[in-house]
Image (spheres, helix red, strand yellow):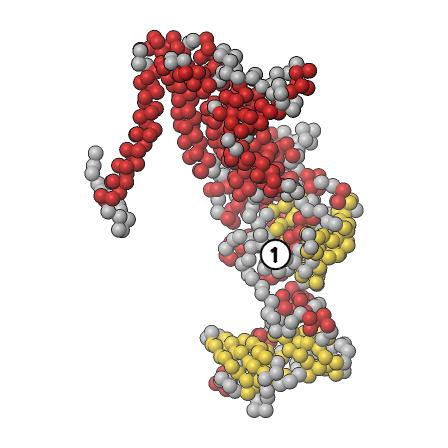
Amino acid sequence: MSISISGLTKRFGQTDVLRGIELGVDKGELVALLGPSGSGKTTLLKIIAGLEWPDAGRLAVDGQDWLQLAAQDRRIGFVFQHYALFPHMKVRDNLAFGLSVRPRAERPGKAVIKAKVDELLHFLQIDHLADRFPAQLSGGQRQRVALGRALAIEPKVLLLDEPFGALDAAIRRDLRRWLRGVHDATGSTTIFVTHDQEEAFELADRVVVMGEGQIAQIGNADAIHDHPATPFVARFMGATVELPVTLLAGRAEGAGLDLSALPRRALPDGAGRLFARPEDITPVPDAGAPWRIVSRTSTGAHLRLVLRHPELGEAETEVSRRAVRAETLIADAPVRLKIDAGTIFPADRHISAASASTRPHIPQKEKTR
Amino acid sequence: MSTATLPHLPGQSGKGARILIGLAVGLTLVFIAAPLAFIFVRAFAQGWQVYAANILHPATVHAIWLTTLVAIIVVPVNVAFGIAAAWAVAKHRFPGRGILVTLIEIPFSISPIIAGICYLLLYGRQGILGPWLQANDIQVVFALPGIVLVTMFVTAPFVAREVLPLMQAQGTEQEQAAVTLGANGWQIFTRVTLPNIKWALLYGAVLCTARAVGEFGGVSVVSGNIRGQTNTLPLHVELLFNDLNAVGAFAAASTLTLIAVVALVVKTILEGRKDAGH
């Protein structure tokens, strides 16, 4: 089922949670909504599910207006971060719930429901859990059951809200691969919400990066990583070093910076701002350069350096210890910074407003509750 | 019996603990066990036959029946009210939600006699609604409706108070999951919400029953104490006592005590279930 969303806005009290969302999802696609907490991604998912209602905008699925449809009638599968299994029912009955609550005329017979549940149990590789209660299952098992319960009604759209957010790293990786397999086998249209970049890029066909109630960028891993569309995306993707540069005929220059590795950009002349990842910055000893090494930490494989410029403040780099002449990179040594990769945005009001040296806080194990 | 020593926490002397335990046991005996035993001792003071004759006295039988009838009416109504109130407060956000929570608790903080007097002033012959009720030949005060109303008021918070914290702790995700699976409101309530609260609900119902059966103050104001007509069991005990019929009073009291003990046992069993979660 193809989903088309336009002009969606939502406000909770004084806060704009969604500010004009435009998004199309093709049939059979697996899309990730990626963003920090508070970006509005879960609200968007809940609106698609019918658990929240927008203040304005359109939501159509296969041409049908879903804002005229109650959640009960949308036939979606929704998977919660904390599973939301029915604790008083066995796994088998949890899976059967969606079929057994259908109106009498549409409800399959008991034998049909049982066969369907058995088929699902087998498909999801949880046959052995059929007669257990949710309290007797591990987190990973619970989430498999929760997905099974959602799939039992053969949903038109499958929606997952931080599905692996409450699980251990190893189980997450395992379940990620398993979910991709389930998606490919059922051919359903799937949207999932996550704040974990690795999860989003590994699992999804397309990633929708959201920030402050808006879609900041849509693309695959490479495009978003190499060509962030906005300073927000650049920061979110780990470009935590921000430096002022001057643009002239598409070339950038900066104090103590070697920017020759960067391609020419079609940007207007004037002030600009460079966003780079610490691992894309190589310090090169240079007696006349304005940067000084103020701290040096070795992790064995890598060398982590903090550099200070008298006017621009501090910048962080992380280089492979073997790749550089580590013995020359000692405390207080003067260096220039060779930027191997980075993105430059014109330094308009918008960027300078978002304070230059603040690092985006991207918690890896947060719970969006 | 082995005399294996119980592990003591550091700094806790065995002697001090024994004194405290002894004190607790002693106080329990003096203040709870002895009066309870005394009820039965006095009830049976003149033998089985006198006890049976007193219990089977028409006025006592009527009082037992009236008290049972009140409980049969009040408890289901308060169960329904408790569930509805808890559901509204726990699962929804609406203006006046805080006020509703306070209102539910009011009967706890108001003396039952005040409640009785309020009903008297509202529904009594000289009350605000008195003339209208009389014109339509409806008797509330000094009759069963008054007793039921006051008992209902006094016991209103018991179920809601038990169910509400549980519902709040459970949140709404299970209900949301049920909605997305296509369940309608009634199915969600009966198949998801209700099973999750059933032990707390039963627990609340038992507390409510015990309180409804034992209610004295409020009922004494509106019942009128008409022997064989509007006399509930607690009122009847007082009446017999004032008649200097000690055996009769204690015989009637023994039935109340039995109800209380049964309620206590059921409550203890339910408490275990409730805490186990299933």
> Is A264 displayed left or right of B230 in the figure?
right
**Subunit bearing disc 1:** A
Residue appearing at x 55%, y 80% in the figure: A307
Any part of residue A214 in sight: yes
A59 lies above or below B200: below
Any part of residue B71 in sight: no
Q: Position of residue B102 (x, y in %)?
A: 57, 39
A335 lies above or below B211: below
Q: Position of residue A32 (x, y in %)?
A: 65, 56
> Is A187 displayed left or right of B259 in the figure?
right
Q: Position of residue A175 (x, y in %)?
A: 55, 52
Q: Position of residue A355 (x, y in %)?
A: 65, 71
Q: Which residue is mark 1?
A: A194
Residue appearing at x 20%, y 37% in the figure: B2
> Is A319 displayed left or right of A352 in the figure?
left
Residue closest to the eye, A51 or A327: A51
> Is A369 displayed left or right of A75 in the figure?
left
Q: Identity of the amino acid at label 1?
A: Thr
**Element on which disc 1 rests:** strand
Residue closest to the eye, A305 or A203: A305
Work out which residue is located at the far bottom of the displayed protein and give it.
Answer: A288
B21 lies above or below B142: below
Work out which residue is located at the far right of the displayed protein and give it.
Answer: A63
Residue appearing at x 77%, y 78% in the figure: A268
Give the quarter of the image for residue B22: top left
Q: How many marks?
A: 1
B216 lies above or below A17: above
Neighbour class for label 1 at 10 Å: few (<14), some, many (≥20)? many
